[in-house]
Image (tube, coloured by chain):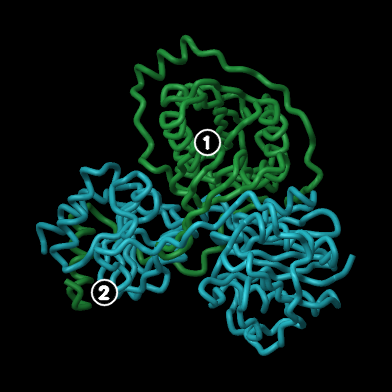
Chain colours: A cyan, B green
Amino acid sequence: MSNDIFVITEHMDGKFSDVSFEMVGKAKELANAWGGQSVSIVVGSGISSDGFASDSTIQVDDETLNRFNPEAYGKVIEALVKEKSPRLVMFGWSATGMDLAAWLSARLGKPCVAYVKGINIEGGALIVNSQIYGGKMMADVSPEGDMAIVAVLAGSFPVEAGQGSTAATQIASPVLLDGLKIKFVEAIKPAAGDVDITAQTKLVSIGRGIGSKDNVELAEELAKKIGATVSSSRPVVDAGWLPRTRQVGKSGLKVKPKLYLMLGISGAPEHLEGMKGAELIIAINTDKKAPIFNVAHYGSTADLFEVAEAMLELL
Amino acid sequence: MNIVVAIKHIPSIADDLPVKGNNVDFDSVDFVLNEFDEQSIEQAVLVKEATGGTVTVVGVDMIGELDGVLHLALAKGADKAVKITGDDPAADSHQQAKWLAEAIKGMSPNIVFAGVQASNDLDGQIGPMIAAHLDMPYIGGVSSVEVAGDTATVNKEFAGGFGAKYAVSLPMVVGVQASTKPPRYAPISKVRQVAQTATIEKVAPSGESSARLTMKKMAPPVVTGHAEMFTGSSKEVAAKIVDLLKSKGLA
């Protein structure tokens, strides 16, 4: 067992995600405190991986790993972790990390913490801070045993601390990658044809509180009056009330408009990830404890339908 | 096709979450079906409708109130309902995944569905853990599933509208982000009818998880900033918002 910290970095089309750098920065700090090494792990094919600030970077290079494949990536990471026995393995709580962190935890019988916002060492022990229940609760937990796995929410740590110039060491895959049950077929590009919400300066964004598909019209009328476009949180899209091209958040699009007027959105961490950089955030939600009020500049717990209708009369 | 859906009964976040000791006060909260499980149940029924087979919904009975959730799933097209008599509202995802995997093993599933995540997944999601226990491949963030023969073709979502299509040799575990079509509605009358006639199979929990977290503290987030709140009637609030927008040249 070592005191090393593994960061499982993530990339798409040769570019690493911000959370990769965020984790590397945090890993360096923790490794220093523990007297271990921070190790960036890159799984892929032909990627330039010399931009991390970690003590070392291991790049597992194989043509089979060219595209994300949870089975292949999982096997490679499991083999590396078993061989090196790090103290902590860090994933992003992202489309890729979410496929791997809990899986690895169950495979190895080691504890896992998801939705991670903070990691500290107190008296040599790991204390992990997790944002659960849709952002309504923060839990401090201590993983038992000699190895822990965490899945970190993007935006939890500074990006800059993870940027550096450590030269990556390329290795071949530590496991055979034939006979995989999962095969990558093709990439899916964002649907074209609809309005691009990332290019809009004003968005009226609706959430579950809008209640039904019929009520979307009210938001559209309001948006039209102020020259805005209607966007939404994920449940609205999942319910089929708006197309997926309008979804803001982790699994949707990241937006940074001048105005983000929110009707009936509670502000789960996944949604905040996509809009917290908006210049003016106004939130209307009847739940006075909705996490969105900790992020919005202005808010109201009034009835969103009454407010929207009254605004239409005034505009 | 043996289609299995593993579900989670979780504390509702629609209301306040009171704290007792260093965890949620489970006696004072309502439990609801994880929202992603609604998508997962729909996706399972859609696959059944396309390929034939049976859909079995299985969950851990956390507080002795799972029957209502299972009846709803049956009313929406599931064929069998199984509850694991865990009766521990604090059972974590690892423990539930262990129990679920043990129960699912005996069902010889061709495909297992689970919601991609739940708001109380402090220790990770049950889907990938069940896959690990059953030694099946797992893909999460899935928004469409088609099964032909012993292969499933699934679309996985990445951020920003990007995604990827994968072909997977069954059996597998799918973490559902959204079903191909929005979840269907089941009228109350149908749910009532199901409740009167359906049998829910009870299974004793089997297996223990060894990967644990020690809870140190649970509390609402420390608020570093708070929105300036507009109060008054809805009309007054609307007027204040319109004034604000006009003052900033946004309306």
Q: Is residue A213 left or right of residue B118?
A: left
- The image quarter containing residue A26 is bottom right
Q: Which percent across, then down, holds residue A247?
A: 36, 58
In the image, B149: left or right of A312?
right
Q: Nearer the viewer, residue B251 or B58?
A: B58
User: On screen, B91 above or below A237?
Assistant: above
In this view, the residue farthest toward the top is B197
Q: Residues within 10 Å of mark 1 (few under 14, many from 20)?
A: few
Residue A277 rendering spot, x and y as whole percentages: 41, 74
**Chain for numbered disc 2:** A
Q: Residue at x 62, y 24 (%)?
A: B83
Q: Is residue A192 visible?
A: yes
Q: Quadrant of residue A40?
A: bottom right
Q: Which numbered dot is residue B149? A: 1
Observer-nearest of B57 and B84 = B57
- Mark toward the viewer: 1 or 2: 1
Tell me which residue sits at (54%, 42%) in the image: B151
Looking at the rendered structure, the kind of residue marked 1 is Gly
Q: Which mark is residue A98?
A: none
Disc on res. A201: 2
Q: Relative to the observer, which residue lies in front, B138 or A176? A: A176
| Figure quadrant of the C terminus of chain A | bottom left
Q: Are marks 1 and 2 on the same chain?
A: no
Q: Quadrant of the N terminus of chain A?
A: bottom right
Could you say whether the residue bearing mark 1 is in a helix, strand or loop? Answer: loop
Local crowd size for mark 2, using a 10 Å CA cut-off: few (<14), some (14–19), many (≥20):
some
Amino acid type, label 2:
Thr
User: Mark 1 near mark 2, Cβ–Cβ under 8 Å?
Assistant: no
